[in-house]
């Protein structure tokens, strides 16, 4: 397989995974699949992360995301998840 094909597949997989996070967070349902609202929310998040409060916002978001991943893993396996461990 050519290098460009491998890179394209990696990029495609990455984009699909990011879209999956938007679905998993419930954003699509909450906005009735309104792309402008979703895009606006993402722009708002980006601005928040670039602000003076960016480090704090990122830390809070990462903690919340890790907590959600841990809860999901616990639901799927019935086992205790290791705090902060990601898939």
Image (cartoon, rainbow, N blue to C red):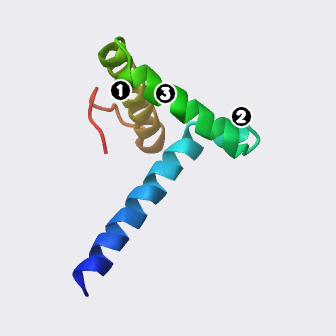
Label 2 environment density (alpha carbons within 10 Å; few <14, some 14–19, many ≥20): few
Residue indicated by mark 3: 45
Residue 85, by quadrant, is top left
Q: CA distance from mark 1 to mark 3?
A: 13 Å
Residue 1 to residue 26: above or below? below
Residue indicated by mark 1: 62
| Contact, mark 3 vs mark 2 (Cβ under 8 Å) | no
- Say which residue appears at 72% left-offset and 36% top-offset: 31
Quadrant assignment for the N terminus: bottom left
Residue indicated by mark 2: 30
**x and y percentages locating residue 25 in the rendered image:** 56, 36
Quadrant assignment for the C terminus: top left
Label 3 environment density (alpha carbons within 10 Å; few <14, some 14–19, many ≥20): some
| Contact, mark 1 vs mark 2 (Cβ under 8 Å) | no
Circle 1: element type? helix
**x and y percentages locating residue 18 in the rendered image:** 46, 49
**Considering only order in the chain, which callout, 3 or 1, is on the residue closer to the N terminus?**
3
**Considering only order in the chain, which callout, 2 or 1, is on the residue closer to the N terminus?**
2
Q: Residue furthest right?
A: 32
Q: CA distance from mark 3 to mark 2?
A: 17 Å
- Say which residue appears at 37% left-offset and 23% top-offset: 50
Q: CA distance from mark 1 to mark 2?
A: 21 Å
In this rendering, position of residue 24 left or right of residue 2: right
**x and y percentages locating residue 37 in the rendered image:** 68, 36
Circle 2: element type? helix
- Say which residue appears at 53% left-offset and 34% top-offset: 42
Circle 3: element type? helix
């Amino acid at each position: 397989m050519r290098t460009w094909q491998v890179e394209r597949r990696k990029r495609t997989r990455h984009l699909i995974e990011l879209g999956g996070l938007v679905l998993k967070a419930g954003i699509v349902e909450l906005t009735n699949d309104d792309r402008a609202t979703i895009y606006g929310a993402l722009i708002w998040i980006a601005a928040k992360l670039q602000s003076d409060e960016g480090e704090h916002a990122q830390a809070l978001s990462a903690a919340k995301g890790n907590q959600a991943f841990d809860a999901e893993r616990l639901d799927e396996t019935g086992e205790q998840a290791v705090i902060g461990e990601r898939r």
